[in-house]
Each structure stands twice: as structure tokens, then as C-alpha cells.
Image: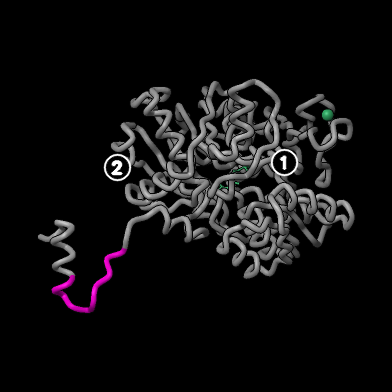
Amino acid sequence: MHNVSHLECIKCGRRYAARPDRYTCDACGDAGILDVIYDYDYIARRVSREAFEDNRDYSMWRYMPFLPVEEGSARRPLRVGWSPLYRAEALGRVLQLDNLYVKDDGLNPTGSLKDRASAVAVLKAMEAGADIVACASTGNAASSLAGNAAALGLRSIIFVPKRAPEGKVAQLLIFGATVISVQGSYQDAFRLSAQAIEKWGWYNRNAAINPYLVEGKKTVSLEICEQLGWQIPDWVVFSVGDGCTIAGGWKGFLDLYRTGLTDRLPKMVGVQAEGCCPISRAFHTGRPVEPVEENTLADSIAVGVPRNPDKALLAVRDSGGTMVNVSDEEILAAMGLLGATTGVFGEPAAAAALAGLRKLVADGAIDRHETVVLCVTGNGLKDIANAIRASGELIRVPPDLEYVERALKRLELRG
Ligand SMILES: *Cc1c(COP(=O)(O)O)cnc(C)c1O
Ligand SMILES: [Zn+2]
């Protein structure tokens, strides 16, 4: 990895060699999250806008010069990344935004942005010589690890909290994972996975702990920028659970800036659920992050004890962005609005980002002329129960046209 210089603790600045199984800082423990530090001069000599134009690899691996994996070290069987960026005019009209884009990361192989991290995790596991990869997850990290591991012939062992939606658990089982359903919260599942990983020495895909995973997630921003013709949006909106996704999003924009491919940076918006908002509370109060209940239907961001709040807070603060909370009702409304105005089906945690954006526009924090990218982080098909709660009634009729006509009359849709 000639592009990587070293790993650096975001708390104390200690440096470590970038070995595949180096997770956190020895001096700071679990709070000592490491950041991958690159040699940007080295990268800058190997990338250009023109070269990207000719690059036929339509996946996250087109950004190989920015990624912390050995070149040619392993196969990359699944097509992760290069998800579409749509111009969302109808949704923009509802929100009163003239330049709104939707990045649909629910179209990744296992249906969420987490595939970007898992694709890196399985390669790092192979570099480390591991046969088994493990993680705890609210659902998407798990299903994406299981899918990406299956594609490379690795075994996966997954710890999920009991609230994980059925769709995600079904994915785990289909991908052949060993699934341990922890009858407790995400916190409980995380703790148990950490103990088991320590005891049996599996490769650790817990995103906050493993510094390489945020690097996979950052490819979403590299794509956004390239898809916008190398323009940097004014705002980029993500929902926030552990904090790794928004941290990755920010890292991608920093990388582009530091290699000179772009000359500005966007403001990052982090959205949390009202019933579980430890990071946004810390952002607004300036106090340390404190554990909270996990009280929201948006399971992917129901993280009461976030594992990567520092990187998330740095992303929002350094970018001059902000954080906002949304209620479950607002999330359900946003889920319906997103689907009906864009044709993109987002899961509740993805719709939360839209609900947050809606609030910020209504409050005047975001101006209608500014360019905004909304990241849809997970596919709504994973959580049908909440989708049905979010949407309207069916029209039930006997198989007779007359009843259809009556129903249409009632809806004033005829002709
Ligand atoms: C994981 C996830 C998030 C939040 O990512 P964090 O790294 O936990 O902050 C948001 N939306 C979806 C769909 C997710 O799966
Ligand atoms: Zn440290």
C-alpha cells in the first residue's frame, strides 16, 4: 500500500503501521479510533479527472488509489458502489430546493451503503490471513458483511440485536452466515461480539473499531463529486447511528481536496432520530456523548452507545455543517414522500435524512438555491413492515370493473 503512510489515533495522535489487523490505539483503548493517513502527493501523481473519465470500472474500486488495500491482493467479486445520483426535481419542488440530488445507495449488492465498508473488510481479512469475519450490527453491516464474505468464500459470524428487521435477518441466513441473535439491545450485541472476537481471534468488521471501513464508505463522496462533474455540493445529508457513515462521507471530500482534484468542501448534515440522538445532543450542547435509549423505528440508526462519535462530530464541525433530530412520524412521512416523488424506496434510516433535510430547509438553514445531495443509505425492501405503516390504504375490489369505476370516482381519478 504505497498510498498509505500510517494510522493515527484521533485522540492522542500516536502513529501505527497500517497492518490489516491493527484496530485501535493501544494507549486510548476503544476510544482511540484510528484514521488512515495517506501520502497525498503519491496519490495526486496517480489520479486525474481525465483518467477517471476513461476508467471503465463502474464500482467503488475505480477509486483504488484512494483505498487502503493491497493492489491486486484479492478478487473483488461483487459490484459495490457507483450507485446512481439522480436529480430530484419533483422532490425539490416539494422541499423548495432548486438543486436537489438523491444518491441511491440502496442499490448496492446487499441493499445498503454498508457494502462499501464490507467490501474493504473482506479484503483486509484476506490480507490478515483470516478465514472468519465477524461483527455486531443493527442489520445492514451484518447482511453486507455476510454477502461480501460469501462472495469471497469467507465464513461470517454475525451478532444482531433482537429488533433487527426480518428482511435483514433473511439476508444473513441466505448468505450462509452464522447468526447469533442477541436477546438485548445493539449495545449488548456489540459487547458480546467484541468478547467473542477477542476470544476466538476472528477478523473484526465492527466499523468504528476497524479503521479501514470508513475508507470504504468514503467512496460514496468520491462518486457524488465525479457524478456532479467534479462540482462540490453545498450540503450533503446523511443519517447518523454509530457515526462512521458521515465520517466516511467527509473523508472522501477531504481526500479529493487534499489531492487537488477539487478546491472546496461541502457542509455535512447529520440526522438522528429524536428517540435516539446521543451524537446530535453532544453536537448542540458541547458536552460529551452519553448513552441513551434506542427508541426509534429507524433500526439502522438506533444506536444508543455510538462507537464513532468523535469522527462524526469532527466531520460535522470541521465542515461547518449541522445536526438535526427527527421524529418517527416525520421519518415515515419522509419515506412516503421520497418514494412518491423519486421512485427511490428508502428504509426508515435513509428516509430520516430526508426528514432532517426538510426541517433545515423549512427553518431557513439551507437556502433554496444551494446544491444539496441527499444520501439514501439503505433499501426499503429490507423493512416492509414500516413501509406499509408509512404508506396509504389499498383499494380492495371484487373482480368487476364497476367497482373499479366507483373507487376511481371516489378518488376523482377517472378520465
Ligand atoms: C448504518 C446505517 C446508517 C448510519 O451509519 P453509521 O455509520 O452507523 O452512522 C444510516 N442508514 C443506514 C441505512 C445504515 O445502514
Ligand atoms: Zn491514542
Q: Quadrant of the N terminus?
A: top right
Which one is nearer the viewer's eye here, 414 or 374?
414
Colour mode of the rendering: one colour
Q: Locate residue 42, reporting x and y percent.
A: 69, 31
Q: Is ligand 1 within 8 Å of the beta carbon of the residue shown at mark 2?
A: no
Q: Is ligand 1 within 8 Å of the beta carbon of the residue shown at mark 1?
A: yes
Badge 1 density bin: few <14, some 14–19, many ≥20, Cα 10 Å: many
What residue is rendered at 40% in x and 44% in y? 334
Q: Is 31 on the left-hand or right-hand side of 95?
A: right
* Residue 77, image quadrant: bottom right
Which residue matches tag 1? 208
Q: Are marks 2 and 1 in contact (CB under 8 Å)?
A: no
Q: Is residue 3 visible?
A: yes
Badge 2 density bin: few <14, some 14–19, many ≥20, Cα 10 Å: some
Q: CA distance from mark 2 to mark 1?
A: 36 Å
* Residue 8, image quadrant: top right
Which one is nearer the viewer's eye here, 407 or 152?
407
Q: Quadrant of the C terminus?
A: bottom left
Q: Is 144 on the left-hand or right-hand side of 323?
A: right
Q: Locate residue 192, reporting x and y percent.
A: 80, 53
SS class of the residue under badge 2?
Answer: helix
Which residue matches tag 2? 90
What residue is rendered at 79% in x and 49% in y? 191
**Residue range highlighted in magenta:** 394-403
Magenta: main secondary structure: loop
Dot 2 or dot 1, earlier in sequence: 2
- Quadrant of the picture in which ligand 2 is shown: top right
Q: Would you say residue 395 sits in the magenta stretch?
A: yes
Whether residue 119 is situated above or below residue 279 in the rendered picture: below
- Going by the numbered disc 1, the residue's amino acid type is Ala
Q: Would you say residue 360 sits in the magenta stretch?
A: no
